[in-house]
Image (spheres, rainbow, N blue to C red):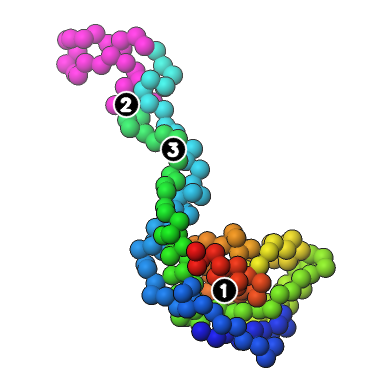
């Protein structure tokens, strides 16, 4: 599919780029997308939750009442989970939520995400640009020129550009990543995907393996 190239002022440069059908026009695999997003979110979890079990609760170890003759159930420890302040039965323990996915499935998921955005016409191709110094106002001007100031957007750079990244860091609705950092979650968790020309070749090369 062909997409026109815009400059950072939002004007048509008169050039067009051909997006690879093998990356931007496949039949989306929803299950692959689900698994990749699930893995991304699972990796964000710290997994540091912990509840004390009866062996870890502070308390006396003496038998709290005699075995027989009380008319109630026998009880041997104040740390019994049945008592207030006792241990927790099968409570959460520190753990890792990460799980493995094959590289081919993750590539399929990203291609599916790109294809979904392309089908929705939510991909903008922008010529490469740089800022001499970090300047949020300049980045906002780019967003306004593209009509994205009130929309959630993701800018994908061919290579990391610290000044462009720092210029966008304070904005809630816009973010900047390099093509090597791009994930399926990032692609889907935005309204408009802005691909800089320098990122296209890297994206297609990486996903065509």
Q: Position of residue 95 (x, y in %)?
A: 44, 37
Q: Position of residue 4 (x, y in %)?
A: 61, 86
Residue denoted by label 1:
193
Comparing 154 with 170, the one in front is 154
Residue denoted by label 3:
95
Q: Earlier in the sequence, mark 2 or mark 1?
A: 2
The quarter holding residue 177 reads: bottom right
Relative to 43, is 49 above or below?
A: above
Q: Is residue 144 left or right of residue 104?
A: right
Q: Is residue 149 visible to us here?
A: no
Write down the region rendered in magenta.
61-85
Q: Position of residue 158 (x, y in %)?
A: 66, 67
Q: Is residue 192 visible to us here?
A: yes
Give me the C-alpha separation between circle 3 and circle 2.
23 Å
Mark 3, other Cα within 10 Å: few <14 / some 14–19 / many ≥20:
few
Farthest front residue in view: 209
Q: Which label was assigned to residue 116? A: none
Circle count: 3
Q: What residue is drawn where x is 46% and y is 63%? A: 107
Magenta stretch encompasses residue 184: no
Q: Position of residue 142 (x, y in %)?
A: 71, 77
The nearer-to-camera label among 2 and 1 is 1
Q: Earlier in the sequence, mark 3 or mark 1?
A: 3
Q: Which label was assigned to residue 81? A: 2
Comparing 104 with 180, the one in front is 104
Q: What residue is drawn where x is 34% and y is 18%? A: 78
> Do the CB atoms of the residues marked 2 and 1 lie less than 8 Å apart?
no
Give me the C-alpha separation between circle 2 and circle 1.
52 Å
Farthest right residue in view: 132
Q: Is residue 115 left or right of residue 138?
A: left
């Amino acid at each position: 599919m062909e997409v026109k190239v815009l400059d950072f002022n939002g004007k048509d440069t008169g050039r067009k780029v051909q997006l690879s059908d093998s990356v931007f026009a496949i039949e989306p695999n929803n299950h692959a997308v689900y698994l990749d997003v699930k893995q991304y979110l699972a990796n964000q979890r710290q997994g540091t939750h912990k509840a004390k079990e009866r062996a870890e609760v502070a308390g006396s170890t003496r038998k709290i009442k005699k075995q027989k003759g009380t008319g109630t159930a026998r009880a041997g420890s104040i740390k019994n989970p049945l008592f207030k302040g006792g241990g927790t039965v099968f409570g959460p323990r520190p753990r890792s939520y990460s799980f493995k996915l094959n590289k081919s499935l993750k590539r399929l998921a990203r291609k599916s995400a790109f294809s979904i955005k392309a089908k929705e016409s939510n991909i903008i191709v922008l010529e490469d640009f740089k800022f001499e110094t970090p300047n949020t106002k300049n980045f906002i001007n780019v967003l306004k020129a593209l009509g994205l100031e009130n929309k959630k957007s993701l800018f994908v750079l061919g290579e990391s550009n610290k000044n462009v990244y720092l210029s966008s860091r304070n904005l809630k609705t816009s973010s900047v990543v390099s093509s090597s950092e791009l994930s399926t979650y990032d692609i889907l968790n935005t309204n408009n995907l802005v691909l800089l020309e320098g990122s296209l070749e890297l994206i297609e090369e990486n996903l065509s393996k």
